[in-house]
């Protein structure tokens, strides 16, 4: 709310006409003004969201007769960097620096099950089905439920933590272990702080989402089907999952050489190049 009010205040101070008289051109000039101030595209889009929401409020709640000047198409295009994943060697180095059993379990669920940090924080004891080696992720991103599977090493890490977890009525799996909030569910920011701490200790730059990206890349390189990876990650669109194909894709390399070998054999043409000095 504070950010919203700050952004709206900056816009209202900048415009030189009454609120009801603001046009699309005024908003576009404001975008140009923010670009001159070197604001990032994502920040500018955040300002546009605040302005658009304010005018929607005037129309819907205050019954003002006006046209929203901050139309949807004004948003700036954002760069979409490829997902970053860890190399196999870096994964081992990172986990050697993770000492707390709770942290090992949390990070393994991201690396092996593809859970988002919010899904780890919200995981409950009742969602874990050890008999079937699976976890039911309830109300994930987009309020969608999905089933993910637990690898043996992730299951072992989780079991080790649950054996030392303090007896409590709290249903959330992962709890704060020190301080005034001891015994309370660990927050998303708390998990992020733990991975930042372990990342610094290991010397390997790691984030929660990188562990999830690493799982997707490893499954792809191990010849897992793209649709399967999409379901495990909870992606709505296959296009999102296909971005992993642009990474260090060993599967694409194998597929190419297997296919081109068959093409060469079927064509019956063998090329021999003699390189002479």
Image (tube, rainbow, N blue to C red):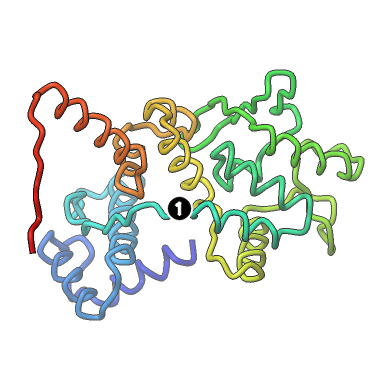
Q: Which quadrant would residue 25 be assigned to in this image? A: bottom left
Q: Position of residue 242 (x, y in %)?
A: 31, 38
Q: How many marks?
A: 1
In depth, the one of 138 and 191 nearer the eye is: 191
Indicate whether 80 appears above or below 9: above
In depth, the one of 39 and 12 nearer the eye is: 39
Determine whether the residue tagged by mark 1 lies in a helix, strand or loop. Answer: loop
Q: Position of residue 118 (x, y in %)?
A: 58, 45
In depth, the one of 59 and 206 nearer the eye is: 206
Q: Quadrant of the C terminus?
A: bottom left
* Pointer 1 residue: 85
Residue furthest right as drawn: 167
In depth, the one of 275 and 51 nearer the eye is: 275
Disc 1 crowd rating (10 Å Cα; few below 14, some 14-19, many 20+) is many
Q: Residue at x 29, y 60 (%)?
A: 45
Q: Position of residue 198 (x, y in %)?
A: 66, 64
Q: Position of residue 97 (x, y in %)?
A: 70, 62
Q: Which quadrant would residue 47 be assigned to in this image? A: bottom left
Residue furthest top as drawn: 132
Residue furthest bottom as drawn: 37
Q: Residue at x 19, y 71 (%)?
A: 30
Question: Would you say 39 lies left or right of 213 here?
Answer: left
Q: Residue at x 54, y 39 (%)?
A: 114
């Amino acid at each position: 709310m504070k950010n919203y009010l700050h952004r709206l205040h900056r816009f209202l101070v900048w415009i030189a006409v009454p609120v009801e008289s603001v046009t699309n051109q005024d908003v576009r000039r404001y975008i140009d003004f923010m670009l001159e101030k070197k604001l990032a595209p994502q920040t500018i889009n955040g300002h546009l969201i605040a302005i658009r929401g304010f005018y929607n409020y005037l129309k819907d709640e205050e019954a003002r007769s006006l046209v929203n000047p901050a139309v949807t198409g004004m948003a700036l295009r954002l760069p979409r960097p490829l997902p970053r994943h860890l190399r196999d060697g870096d994964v081992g180095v990172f986990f050697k620096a993770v000492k707390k059993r709770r942290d090992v379990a949390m990070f393994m669920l991201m690396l092996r099950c593809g859970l988002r940090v919010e899904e780890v924080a919200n995981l409950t004891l009742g969602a874990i089905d050890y008999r079937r080696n699976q976890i039911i992720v309830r109300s994930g991103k987009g309020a969608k439920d999905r089933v993910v599977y637990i690898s043996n090493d992730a299951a072992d890490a989780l079991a080790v933590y649950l054996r030392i977890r303090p007896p409590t009525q709290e249903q959330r799996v992962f709890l704060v272990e020190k301080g005034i909030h001891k015994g309370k569910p660990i927050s998303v920011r708390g998990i992020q702080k733990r991975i930042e701490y372990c990342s610094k200790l290991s010397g390997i730059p790691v984030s929660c989402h990188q562990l999830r990206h690493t799982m997707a890349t490893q499954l792809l390189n191990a010849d897992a089907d793209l649709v399967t990876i999409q379901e495990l990650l909870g992606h709505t669109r296959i296009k999102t999952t296909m971005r992993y194909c642009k990474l260090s894709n060993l599967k694409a390399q194998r597929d190419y050489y297997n296919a081109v070998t068959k093409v060469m054999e079927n064509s019956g043409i063998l090329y021999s190049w003699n390189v002479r000095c």
